[in-house]
Amino acid sequence: MAFRLSNNLVGILNFLTFLLSIPILGGGIWLKTHSNQATECEKFLQDPLIAIGVFLLLVSLAGLIGACCRVTWLLWIYLFVMFILILLLFCFTIFAFVVTNKGAGETVSGRGYKEYRLGDYSNWLQKRVNSTKNWNKIRSCLVDSKVCQSLEEKTETYQQFYQDNLSPIQSGCCKPPSECNFVYVSPTQWTKNGTTTSYSNPDCNTWDNNNSTLCYDCQSCKAGVVANLKSDWKKVAVLNIIFLVFIVIVYSVGCCAFRNNRRDNSYGGWKGGYP
């Protein structure tokens, strides 16, 4: 009875994981075969999707065959991979909370949105976005995804715009910082003050009204991306904790199935030797 319960449960869970791996792997292959039409963001997802799909496929097959067909060595490999996965998830969850613990948006007087400074966030995140190679990819994604398009299409007075609740990326990438004191024309069109020749904030010089430029190269844009990443990582970390509990339960059931396999094999060998 114990053998049936633990082994069947492992088999069912891995069969579901096997089914899940198929669309993930298929999505990665589809993106790979349509790479000529893909944006930079979509190209970035190709290899990770394929890798995750292959990983889930192989691990689920090892667990499925090992549990249902009583192949002990396959089940051992499955449990070893699961143990490594538990360690990695635990480490990533701790790392995510530590890295995202620092930094927050600054409230601007008379504004419905916050503004963001890159220096307020962890050094690790700063280094990631300050890397030219990384930022070129991120910038391309921002342009391709048209994060500022919703603002470009608005016809608001400056009083209405100042009350908008902008996302961190919109606040950092789609408009100049408030301290630049530019004259408002539209949400993505601003006129530089002719009496000001130098600015303490370099983002003021970086700003351009061209829709493909705007403030995508500003430090405030990088800060907005990091603020958005921080929010997403905290959500992922919470989900990781739930997933980690689930994986530990599956691992425990797998250990029972492994023990039952060995016991069954030993019993089979004893029975074969002593009819």
Image (tube, rainbow, N blue to C red):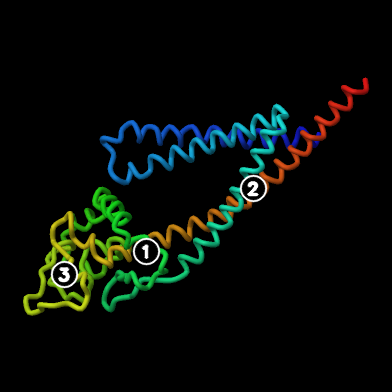
Comparing 10 with 94, the one in front is 94
Locate residue 210, reporting x and y percent: 13, 57
- Would residue 155 appear left or right of 144 to someone viewing this image? left
Comparing 255 with 73, the one in front is 73
The numbered mark at residue 127 is 1
What amino acid is labelled 1 in the image? Answer: Lys
State yes or no: discs 1 and 2 in contact (Cβ < 8 Å): no
Local crowd size for mark 1, using a 10 Å CA cut-off: few (<14), some (14–19), many (≥20): few
Query: Which corner quadrant holds the N terminus?
Result: top right
Locate residue 274, reporting x and y percent: 93, 23
Q: Quadrant of residue 224?
A: bottom left
- Would residue 63 appear left or right of 215 to someone viewing this image? right
Say which residue label 2 marks.
83
Q: CA distance from mark 1 to mark 2?
A: 31 Å
In the image, residue 115 above or below residue 225: below
In the image, residue 24 above or below residue 213: above
Residue drawn at x 48%, y 61% is 234
Q: Secondary structure at mark 2?
A: helix
Q: Mark 3 or mark 2, which is nearer the start of the sequence?
A: 2
Q: CA distance from mark 2 to mark 3?
A: 52 Å
Locate residue 78, reporting x and y percent: 64, 39
Query: Which corner quadrant holds the C terminus?
Result: top right
Q: Quadrant of residue 185?
A: bottom left
Q: Secondary structure at mark 1?
A: helix
Say which residue label 3 marks.
205
Residue drawn at x 29%, y 45% is 40
Locate residue 33, reporting x and y percent: 33, 31
What amino acid is labelled 3 in the image? Answer: Asn
What amino acid is labelled 2 in the image? Answer: Phe
- Would residue 130 appear left or right of 150 to someone viewing this image? right
